[in-house]
Image (cartoon, rainbow, N blue to C red):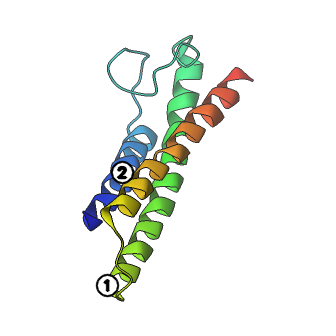
Amino acid sequence: MMYTVFLIPILIVVVGFLLFKFPPSKPNWFIGYRTNKSMKDEKAWKEANNYCGKLFLIVGLFELVLSIVLLVLNYLSISFSDTILSIVVIVQLIPMLITVVLVEKKISK
């Protein structure tokens, strides 16, 4: 169970990298940061995907570092219960929601 705390940060980093380095070129309903505001026009689409990619990279790397700290603490005999690790995984989702709010705010301007 301890290694599951790495799943979300790694996924966030991968998605962030892909959105930042290889953003979808045109609005579509399959790949990219897809909201009504971001799909309004190509400029909003590009800006939303680029910004979301940057934020996901930052958030994912930060969460990855925290996960490594948890892993080190776990091996230093501070054993975490499955309940605590489940809470950590759920808390890791909160920055993703904040990212959505920040991206929407940026493309609204």
Amino acid bearing label 1: Tyr
Horizontal and vertical percent position of residue 53:
48, 42
SS for dot 1: helix
| Label annotation for residue 8 | 2
- Label 2 neighbour load within 10 Å: few <14, some 14-19, many 20+: some
Residue at image position (36%, 72%) is: 80
Give the camera-side residue of 24 and 36: 36
Identify the residue at the far right of this view: 109
Residue at image position (51%, 18%) is: 35
| Label annotation for residue 54 | none
- Label 1 neighbour load within 10 Å: few <14, some 14-19, many 20+: few
Mark 1, mark 2: which one is toward the viewer?
1
**Relative side of 108 to 72, left or right:** right
Horizontal and vertical percent position of residue 89:
39, 53
Q: Which residue is mark 1?
A: 75
Give the camera-side residue of 79 and 72: 79
